[in-house]
Image (spheres, rainbow, N blue to C red):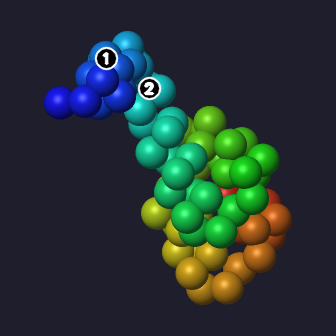
């Protein structure tokens, strides 16, 4: 294992479950086409349905409109 992999493994161990969930939600929203600011805002809200957020974007809903629906 390389030094970078070792460091990455150690850092991953320092993350809390909430931080890992936030990172996953944020990455999913970015991949769905939300801009970084909006993806961050939505990822912070556990009450926002991530799957609905992705479906809205896949259906062609503009990010700002989707956010109005989700929030």
Q: In the image, 29: left or right of 61?
A: left
From mark 1 to mark 2, how far is it between C-alphas? 17 Å
Residue 45's tag is none
Asked whether residue 71 appears in the rendered view, the answer is: no
User: In x, y percent, where is residue 1?
Assistant: 18, 30
The residue wearing badge 2 is 18
Q: Nearer the viewer, residue 34 or 46?
A: 34
Q: Is residue 15 left or right of residue 35?
A: left
In the displayed structure image, the side of residue 17 where residue 47 appears, left or right:
right
The image position of residue 29, as x and y in percent, is 58, 58
> Image quadrant of residue 12?
top left
Please determine whether, in this image, residue 70 is positioned above or below residue 5: below
Q: Secondary structure at mark 1?
A: helix
Disc on res. 10: 1
For image coordinates 50% across by 57% down, the residue present is 28
Considering every residue shown, the one lying at the far bottom of the view is: 59
Which quadrant of the figure has residue 33?
A: bottom right
State the residue at coordinates (68%, 43%): 40
Q: Position of residue 10 (x, y in %)?
A: 31, 17
Give the side of residue 8 with respect to residue 70, left or right. Answer: left
Asked which quadrant contains residue 4, the reply is: top left
Decide: few, some or many residues near mark 1? Use Cα within 10 Å; few <14, some 14-19, many ≥20.
few
């Amino acid at each position: 294992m390389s030094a970078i992999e070792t460091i990455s493994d150690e850092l991953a161990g320092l993350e809390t479950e909430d931080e890992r969930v936030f990172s996953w939600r944020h990455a999913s929203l970015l991949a769905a086409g939300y801009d970084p600011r909006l993806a961050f805002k939505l990822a912070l809200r556990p009450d926002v349905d991530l799957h609905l957020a992705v479906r809205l974007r896949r259906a062609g809903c503009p990010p700002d409109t989707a956010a109005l629906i989700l929030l």
